[in-house]
């Protein structure tokens, strides 16, 4: 390779690294549409960045794959092939649009896995990504608080800009659920749960841990809060099993954490004390009434299992990729985003037992490796806690169409298998 070729290759990789960083910091902007709502789909920053990432990755040509990345690639190919097969017979053109998005999302995660594996400054990359993402979240949340304080927070007021949603969701008129660019408070809570556990791996992020936890708490997302603390206490338990002498130190840290959380919650309660009982009644009614979220979840699960129980072929092969919105119209009307509000129920309904097994392998492969070599793999307990948090989140939410979700999966594979030898291709 001559000097000109070498310079060109380095230049391409430099652009590729920049594209990857931009992609990582853009995955939280779900509610930003660079087409200003004038196209048939939302052009989010993450989608645009993924195009650039894929393009420059293909141009680079020279890269290395480890054995575990090859396994990941094979799983992606099998999942996409099966999803493509299960689109037929086509029931709605929207299925094809979602299949394309799903393909771009999973392929981007494969490229992201390669980029993580080849990075020489992984800690700096992760730290800068998390810090910039947090800054964006805080900035957009402050704007949302501004609109909430102005009193225009009922969700019916027109957005101030056509390309981004800035009015926060609320529980009654009392508490804003800040999203900071995310699609909804649940997703915001899930992403910052991941950030929280990253702080156990990346030394520079440790001072941010309490902030990440507080952001999750103030999303008021039941599933996010439950997943965070259940996984956090699992991590503590695993660490104590490995070293019982940690018990004394853990007690002190846990007490400090609980004290900080109690203080913040107390300030929150005091700020709404005049309307506290009304707020509690509104919140409970929203959850438990006939039209509440809890009852809707139950109705959705009943609908899915009733459809599958009467059709053995559908149970095995599914009703068709991205058909949930068609079968949930009795509950959500013509909402094209209608789904069963559970990753497991949705995947089983759309792709059957076969598709669910293929999808589960993305989690079972690293989990098996972590359990088998927990003593040898660095941060194994943290990675198990992240997997457990995802398992809990997916009981009541659907994430498989989101860029950030597949980046988290890719990171779990990288951190679990990164000690493997590289094989050039």
Image (spheres, grey):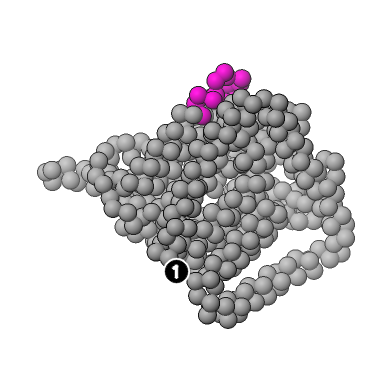
| Quarter of the rendering containing residue 353 | top right
Q: Is residue 42 magenta?
A: no
Whether 399 is drawn above or below 121: the answer is above
Q: Quadrant of the N terminus?
A: top left
Q: Position of residue 63 (x, y in %)?
A: 27, 44
* Residue nearest the observer in this picture, 33 or 353: 353
Is 356 situated left or right of 61 in this image? Answer: right
Question: Disc 1 designates what residue?
Answer: 203
Residue at the spot 64% in from the left edge and 26% down from the top edge: 312
Marks counted in the figure total 1
| Residue 354 lies in quadrant | top right
Secondary structure category for the residue under label 1 = helix
- Identify whether 129 is placed above or below 339: below
Q: Nearer the viewer, residue 103 or 71?
A: 71
What residue do we see at 40% from left, 42% from top? 72
The structure residue drawn at horizontal position 37% and vertical position 52%, both measured from the top left corner, is 116
Residue numbers of the magenta segment: 83-95
- Does residue 393 appear in the picture of this structure? yes
In the picture, the quarter occupied by the C terminus is top left
Q: Can residue 90 be found in the magenta stretch?
A: yes
x, y (%) of residue 270?
A: 80, 68
Horizontal arrangement in the rendering, residue 391 relative to residue 71 (left or right)? right
Depth check, front residue: 177 or 158: 177
In the rendered view, does 67 fall on the left or right side of 206? left
Between 332 and 342, the residue placed more toward the observer is 342
Q: Is residue 43 above or below residue 233?
A: above
Q: Residue 127: in sight, yes or no? A: no
């Amino acid at each position: 390779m001559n000097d000109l070729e070498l310079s060109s290759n380095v230049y391409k990789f430099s652009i590729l690294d920049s594209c990857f960083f931009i992609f990582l910091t853009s995955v939280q902007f779900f509610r930003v549409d660079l087409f200003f709502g004038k196209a048939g789909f939302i052009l989010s920053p993450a989608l645009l960045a993924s195009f650039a990432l894929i393009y420059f990755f293909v141009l680079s040509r020279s890269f290395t794959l480890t054995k575990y990345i090859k396994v990941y690639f094979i799983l992606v190919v099998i999942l996409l092939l099966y999803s493509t097969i299960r689109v037929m017979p086509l029931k709605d053109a929207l299925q094809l649009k979602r299949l394309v998005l799903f393909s771009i999302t999973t392929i981007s995660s494969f490229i992201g896995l390669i980029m993580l594996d080849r990075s020489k400054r992984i800690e700096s990359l992760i730290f800068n990504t998390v810090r910039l993402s947090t800054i964006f979240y805080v900035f957009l949340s402050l704007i949302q608080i501004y609109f909430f304080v102005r009193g225009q927070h009922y969700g019916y007021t027109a957005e101030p800009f056509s390309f981004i949603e800035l009015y926060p969701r609320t529980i009654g008129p009392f508490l804003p659920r800040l999203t900071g660019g995310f699609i909804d408070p649940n997703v915001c809570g899930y992403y910052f749960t991941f950030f929280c556990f990253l702080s156990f791996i990346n030394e520079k992020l440790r001072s941010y841990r309490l902030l990440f936890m507080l952001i999750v708490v103030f999303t008021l997302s039941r599933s996010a809060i439950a997943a965070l603390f259940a996984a956090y206490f699992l991590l503590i338990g695993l660490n104590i099993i490995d070293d019982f002498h940690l018990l004394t130190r853990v007690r002190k840290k846990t007490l400090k954490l609980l004290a900080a959380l109690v203080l913040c919650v107390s300030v929150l309660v005091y700020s709404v004390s005049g309307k506290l009982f009304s707020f509690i009644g509104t919140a409970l009614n929203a959850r438990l009434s006939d039209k509440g979220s809890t009852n809707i979840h139950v109705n959705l699960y009943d609908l899915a299992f009733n459809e599958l129980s009467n059709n053995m072929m559908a149970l095995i092969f599914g009703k068709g990729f991205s058909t949930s919105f068609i079968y949930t119209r009795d509950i959500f009307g013509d909402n094209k985003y209608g789904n069963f509000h559970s990753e497991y129920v949705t995947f089983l309904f759309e792709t059957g037992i076969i598709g669910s097994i293929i999808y589960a392998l993305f989690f079972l492969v690293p989990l098996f490796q972590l359990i088998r070599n927990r003593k040898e793999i660095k941060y194994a307990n943290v990675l198990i806690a992240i997997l457990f948090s995802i398992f809990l989140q997916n009981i009541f939410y659907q994430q498989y169409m989101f860029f950030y979700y597949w980046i988290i999966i890719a990171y779990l594979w990288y951190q679990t298998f990164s000690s493997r030898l590289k094989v050039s291709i």
